[in-house]
Amino acid sequence: MKKLFLTVASILFLATTGNVASASELKLENEQKLNYENWVDEQINLATGDEKTELLNSYKQYKELSNEDQEKLVEYLYNPEVQEQMIDALSTVPKNSSRSLQGGDIEVTGDTPSIENAGKAKATTTTNTATYKRGIEVLGVRIFETTIYVKYSYSSGKITGSQSMDAYTSLNFNPLLSSSYSEKTINKSDLLVLASSKVKYSYIYQNIIYSKNGTISIWADVNDHSGGSFVENS
């Protein structure tokens, strides 16, 4: 009888500790979700212009998810292994294509480059802007986006000037992923203009640091063709 009592007690102990662990995990998940949503609110309040618009669009997408999927999205963002997969894909996915992770929950895209004012008559001086973006979506929510653009002018079948370029993070809905840009350059000939920038993507969480370096580029020619690329640096 005593032996039976011990067995039952052991079972009750295991069941109890299991419930305690589940409650602790649930509390941690709720805290992470609350912290994440507070961070998003702060970023929206601080943002202006296009950045604010992009953040509000992503926040709307996030709020349209079920509570279960909201929790799942936050879990992905606080998972170092998943974040490494996202950074690796962001550094290697070709233009005009995408790469799926985590059974399709995550899509990393190298968007199709675009040219503003494409197709306009070239007899007169025209100013164009070529843009290339790379981004990450989790459960349909755009959480990160890198943009590079080059603004240039052409006339009579020639590129006559390169006016400006920039590379920057146009959307960050991910509190643990950061990016920095350096060595921004722009070059042109009569037929083509090319802009590029060094980029460093970093994920920092507790004692874990993971980063990738590369060069993002955008080019355009007088025939309204354009292309974008990301080349990982060793």
Image: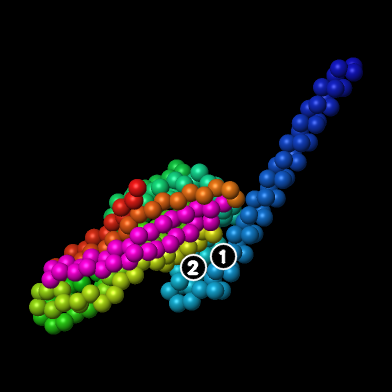
Q: Which residues are magenta?
A: 176-205
Dot 1 crowding, Cα within 10 Å, few <14, some 14–19, many 20+: many
Residue 194 image offset from top left, x and y in percent: 23, 65
Residue 105 image offset from top left, x and y in percent: 46, 48
Identify which residue is drawn at 52% across, 65% down: 59
Judge by depth and name the residue closer to the eye, 152 or 25.
152
Labels 2 & 1 near each other (Cβ < 8 A): yes
Asked whether, in this view, residue 211 is left or right of residue 4, the answer is left
Amino acid type indicated by mark 2 = Leu
Identify which residue is drawn at 15% across, 69% down: 189
Helix, strand or loop: magenta stretch: strand
- SS category of the residue bearing label 1: helix
Sequence-first tag of 2 and 1? 1
Q: Which residue is mark 1?
A: 40
Dot 2 crowding, Cα within 10 Å, few <14, some 14–19, many 20+: many
Identify which residue is drawn at 60% across, 50% down: 206
Mark number for residue 55? 2
Asked whether, in this view, residue 36 is left or right of residue 105, the answer is right
Amino acid type indicated by mark 1 = Val
- Residue 185 colored in magenta in the image: yes
Position above or below: 195 against 95: below
